[in-house]
Image (cartoon, rainbow, N blue to C red):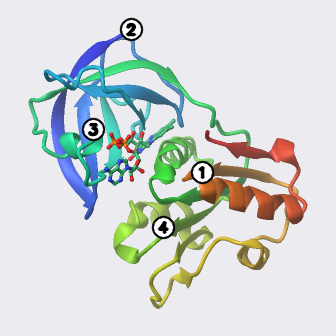
């Protein structure tokens, strides 16, 4: 089912990532980590659907999306041109990631979005403590909502940069070595989201460090 929603607010959260706050359709519900197919309610764009994750909580009266903009003529570039008052179309909700207990969230770039929703929900319930975040980006300027993650998880929020050395931040990639340095117990839940290559290599590293396949939740 399609719902037309107005954009209420738009702001940059990093140099290439925009937060959109939109109206929320009546009786529209989702679980933290779920997504919907979004398109732009303008001629030529209505059928160009792209998946985006809800970053708001289901109980919020509005929807929030955090969208990384790709600078070619695709949907995200067109989204970056929209203003409050313009309309999006949202559809049914779906998604494979959901929280099954304390664990380690491992995200690459815009793959962080389902974890924003899940961790905000856990914060609300007083259950965020004890979870860990390993968040990989190319550079410091690419980190989405760094301050909020630090507030939610304290020193259990780790940021690793692949193309920049910066004091207070890890550098390199999330590989076996990195995981061994940060994680003592591989007998716990792991939540993985990011570009396909990132998921494949982190999953492989987790496997060889002894994480059981049932304990690794992957957003595909
Ligand atoms: C379940 C799910 C949830 C998601 N949630 C989010 C979210 O909350 N936030 C978010 O930001 N993303 C999210 N994504 C990813 C998002 O859907 C894509 O980034 C988006 O569809 C890209 O749309 P586009 O039309 O701008 O790019 P597309 O044209 O669809 O291109 C996608 C990819 O191809 C590359 N590419 C294609 N053509 C060119 C070109 N000419 N030049 C250079 N590069 C090119 C781009 O680099 C990009 O990686 C999610 C994906 C899934 C599967």
Q: Is the residue marked by circle 4 packed among few (<14), some (14-19), or many (20+) residues within 10 Å?
A: some
Which residue is disc 3 drawn over?
75
Query: Residue 119 or 217: which is nearer the viewer?
Result: 217
- Label 2 residue SS: loop
Element under disc 4 = helix
Residues at marks 2 and 3, CA–CA distance in whole angstroms: 20 Å
Which mark, by number, is residue 57? none
Cα–Cα span, label 3 and label 1: 20 Å
- Mark 2 or 3: the one toward you: 3
Q: Are marks 2 and 3 in contact (CB under 8 Å)?
A: no
Dot 1 corresponds to which residue? 196
Location of residue 166 in the rendering, given as x and y in whole percent from the top left corner: 45, 88
Tag 4 residue: 150
- The reply to whether discs 4 and 1 touch (Cβ–Cβ < 8 Å) is no
Report helix, strand or loop for mark 1: helix
Tag of residue 1 = 2
Mark 4 vs mark 1: give the one in front: 1
Where is 62 relative to 178, above or below?
above
Residue 172, how many percent across, how many down? 59, 80
């Amino acid at each position: 089912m399609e719902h037309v929603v107005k954009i209420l607010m738009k702001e940059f959260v990093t140099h290439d990532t925009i937060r959109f706050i939109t109206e929320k359709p009546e009786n529209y519900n989702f679980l933290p980590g779920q997504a919907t197919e979004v398109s732009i309610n303008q001629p030529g764009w209505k059928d160009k659907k792209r998946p985006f994750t809800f970053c708001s909580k289901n109980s919020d009266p509005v929807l929030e999306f955090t969208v990384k903009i790709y600078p070619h003529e695709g949907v995200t570039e067109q989204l970056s041109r929209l203003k409050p008052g313009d309309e999006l179309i949202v559809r049914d909700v779906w998604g494979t990631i959901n929280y099954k207990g304390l664990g380690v969230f491992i995200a690459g770039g815009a793959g962080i979005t389902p974890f924003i929703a899940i961790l905000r929900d856990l914060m609300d319930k007083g259950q965020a403590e004890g979870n860990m975040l390993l968040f990989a980006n190319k550079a410091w300027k690419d980190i989405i909502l760094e301050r909020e993650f630090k507030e939610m998880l304290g020193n259990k929020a780790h940021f690793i940069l692949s193309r920049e050395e910066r004091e207070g931040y890890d550098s390199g990639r999330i590989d076996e070595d990195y995981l061994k340095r940060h994680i003592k117990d591989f007998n716990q839940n792991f939540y993985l989201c990011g570009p396909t290559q990132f998921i494949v290599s982190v999953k492989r590293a987790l496997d060889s460090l002894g994480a059981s396949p049932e304990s690794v939740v992957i957003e595909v």
